[in-house]
Amino acid sequence: MSLKDPNPVDRAKPKRIALVLANPAVSSTTGWPVGFWWSELTHPWLAFHERGYEVELFSPGGGRCEADAMSDPRDPSGYSSDDIVTMGFIATPRLAALVEATKPVEAISLDAFDAIVVAGGQAPMFTFEGATALHARFAAFLETGKVAAALCHGTAILRYAKLSNGEYVAKGRTVTGFANVEEDFADSAVWSMGALPRDRHVMPWRIEDALKALGANYIQVGLWRGFAVRDGNLVTGQQNFSGAETARAVIGALGGMKPMPFTGRCHCGGVRYRVAEAVGVIVCHCRDCQQMHGNANAMLAAAAEAVTLDSDATLVWYASSPAAERGFCSRCGGRLFKRLKEGGRMLVSAGTVDPPTGMTVIRDVWAQSKGDWYEIPPRG
């Protein structure tokens, strides 16, 4: 037993997590055995354990699960040799044994769990289409207001899970998952090793393309960077380096870790505000932003209800287009907000936020309208 006090939110009733692994399979594109990815189990497990949460393992078919070889720190490739969290899990017999006897997804009771977390690995890309019980459980968690999360190729579940009205759970949501730039990297790696001919790909389809096609607002922060995003009670993580970030977002959604609000103001202080939670920084290159800011405009993206005005005596609004209005300080001229008339989004000028923000640029928009005096840097 650990001597560290996990300081759970409620010792009498700890939060309970249903963590789903993919069953082993054989890749239809490479012929290789595929499974779950160790770090997408072990890193969330550690974060949940330190909060005093209870975690149970499930898989669509139940029974023994097998990991992708390169996710094992002991693998001769050395790819995951630095993953000491996973090594500790594997070296603990009572934990390693859990992977040998997962329960079937049908055994997940909505009443018994507060969140469902779907780990990735390569197998979900080949097996989740037929995992209809998992589709139903994932959607049920969302529709009942509980937390549903997926990371890396585990976000394949979003391609199949539908709400009771027939719409995909990802439609209209801000999500992430294994990025095209990461699929390109993986393909190039196996091609350079001669493991696959250049007309064949590791994966049969791509997460980023599929989620965009479903109407999701897909975002990513670049190659192999840990990242997770929460949209209401849906949490998604970008790839295998995002296990801890995904777990923290789940813990936050369950009320166990409240994000510190951002604060900011205009130059004279006539307008002061707080932002409870933000997705990341979007850089807009549209002509309206150029004319009003003198250049591209970096903005924190947040839900309108997440923004609270503490002082607005000098705030004025200007309808800059049929789709949006902008908030300015009438005294110092500070440009603070862009409020979209549809979608419930508020964009806050990043330069007015009190540092440090801890935010990163997640995407550029209206890049085709950028000024000809600068270049947009690659974002991964």
Image: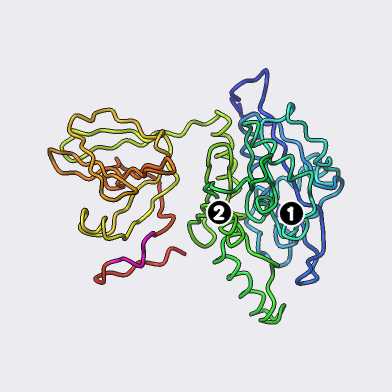
Residue 36 - label: 1
Query: For this view, does 157 lie left or right of residue 339?
Result: right
How far apart in space, not on screen, are marks 2 and 1 (Cα)? 27 Å
Which comes sooner in the sequence, label 2 or label 1?
A: 1
- Circle 2 is placed at which residue position? 215
Query: Residue 334: image x %, image y %?
Result: 19, 44
* x and y percentages locating residue 3 in the rendered image: 65, 29
Against 140, residue 218 (above or below) is below
263 or 298, which lies in front? 298
Residue drawn at point x = 77 percent, y = 61 percent: 34
Report which quarter residue 279 is drawn in: top left
Picture coordinates of residue 46 (x, y %)? 65, 40
SS for callout 1: loop
Quarter of the figure with residue 114: top right
Q: Residue furthest left?
A: 331
Question: Callout 2: helix, strand or loop?
Answer: loop
Horizontal side of 313 relative to 366 (left or right) equals left
* Crowd rating for badge 1 (residues with CA inside 10 Å; few <14, some 14–19, many 20+): many
Q: Give me the residue at 62% from left, 33% from top.
A: 50
Q: Within 10 Å of the Cα at label 2, are there few (<14), some (14-19), or many (20+) other Cα atoms?
A: some
Q: Position of residue 9 (x, y in %)?
A: 59, 23
Q: Nearer the viewer, residue 341 or 89?
A: 341
Residue 98 — which label?
Answer: none
Farthest top residue?
12
Magenta stretch encompasses residue 21: no
- Label 1 is placed on what type of residue? Phe
Q: Nearer the viewer, residue 263 or 90?
A: 263
Picture layout, residue 349 above or below residue 76 = above
Which residues are drawn in magenta?
A: 365-370
Of the pair 148 and 32, the residue shown nearer to us = 148
Which quadrant of the figure contains the N terminus? Answer: top right
User: Looking at numbered disc 2 in the image, what kind of residue is underneath it?
Assistant: Gly
